[in-house]
Image (cartoon, grey):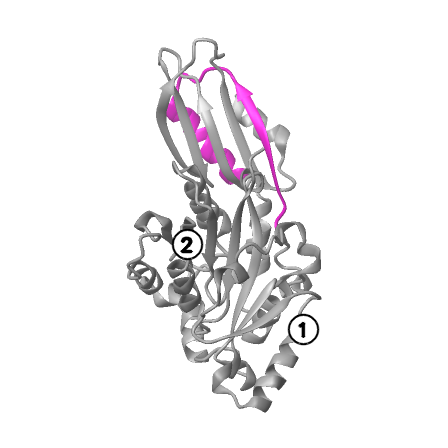
Amino acid sequence: MTQKIPATIVTGFLGAGKTSLLRHLVAHAAGRRLAFVINEFGTLGIDRELLLGCGMAACCEDDIVELANGCICCTVAEDFLPTLQGILERGEAPDHIVIETSGLALPQPLVQAFNWPEVKSRVSVDGVIVVIDAAAVAAGRFAEDPAAVAAQRAADPSLGHDNPLEEVFADQLACADLVILNKSDLLDAAARAATRAAIAARLRPAVKLIEAEHGRIAPPLLLGLGAAAEEDLANRPSHLDAAGEHDHDDFESFVVERGPVADTAGFLRKLAAAATAHDILRLKGFLAVPGKELRQVVQGVGARLDHYFDRPWGADEARRSRLVVIGRKGLDRAAIAAALQA
Ligand SMILES: [Zn+2]
């Protein structure tokens, strides 16, 4: 067993100071290899450019992936998980993964994604960091520019939740392992103390609150929290639970084995049909194709399937086809297996 790679989730509304925090992290990485997943699509491309523009050797282009297709918690299966797997499958795995969510994302469904079978064995959520605009919170607005947040919401067709900012804020606090109070220098002493106390009162015990200016926080305070948040969702309630509309997804996976596949194209059509009929989220594995020296790899997200030959079969390897099927709990395993073995 190798040690799991820690992943830190940084959330907070547009303008709260998440990017400053990330830039400071990159500038003080001290040789630690960081990979970033950026989902702040309201500022399309800008966060990535800002990070790349840091000019730091520790920050190479491949280490920053942008997820600009919509809210990260609503596109977990289609976008986030394949991206994370891409990072894990690269030659040199990072020392730490940092995920910046859009300000509208609810942290709980994202944390739950780390219970996905392919990910759980390799990565653990080191901590959820919530960056707060203290001045905006003190004014009851939560975000510096609520109109910009509303525009961000309107621009995202994949967004599956329309919670008011106050509820998103409550979910952020409920899931936090660390809260960064930015821009508190804009408040006078009394307002600053009152805001700090009001937020502290809403945090789980032992969750720390740090005041910062321009995201300048020493990396050891941010990374290495060891929260294993994915194991602790029961203590991090979300408005989605109360609404009952979007349970934290529980995933399951199983393996289907079968003999060689002579008609690959026909089989792929069958796979796509099964993925749609049974709401399969991910399919991956390889096929034995008669007369071919190479294994054929198949992988798919939903009904979108990719296939290619990867390597010759080993001399001592049984030429069998083997597929891992992943979906939400309650897959009809017997029906899926029957469809794939036909
Ligand atoms: Zn979402």
Badge 2 local density, few (<14 within 10 Å), some, or many (20+)? few
Span colored in magenta: 249-277
Q: How many marks?
A: 2
Q: Whole-percent x and y of residue 197? A: 65, 80
SS type, badge 2:
loop
At 53% across and 90% down in the image, what residue appears?
Answer: 188
Report if residue 224 is visible in the image. Answer: yes
Q: Whole-percent x and y of residue 255? A: 57, 27
At 66% across and 64% down in the image, what residue appears?
Answer: 243
- Nearer to us of marks 2 and 1 is 2
Badge 1 local density, few (<14 within 10 Å), some, or many (20+)? few
Q: Whole-percent x and y of residue 95? A: 46, 46
- Residue 272: within the magenta? yes
Looking at the picture, which amino acid does disc 1 mark? Answer: Arg
Report if residue 156 is visible in the image. Answer: no
- Report the residue that reaches farthest toward the front: 30
Side (left or right) of 10 relative to 245: left
For the N terminus, the quadrant is top right
* Depth check, front residue: 4 or 58: 58
Q: Classify residue 88 by image quadrant.
A: top left
Side (left or right) of 207 relative to 72: right
Q: Which residue is mark 2?
A: 30
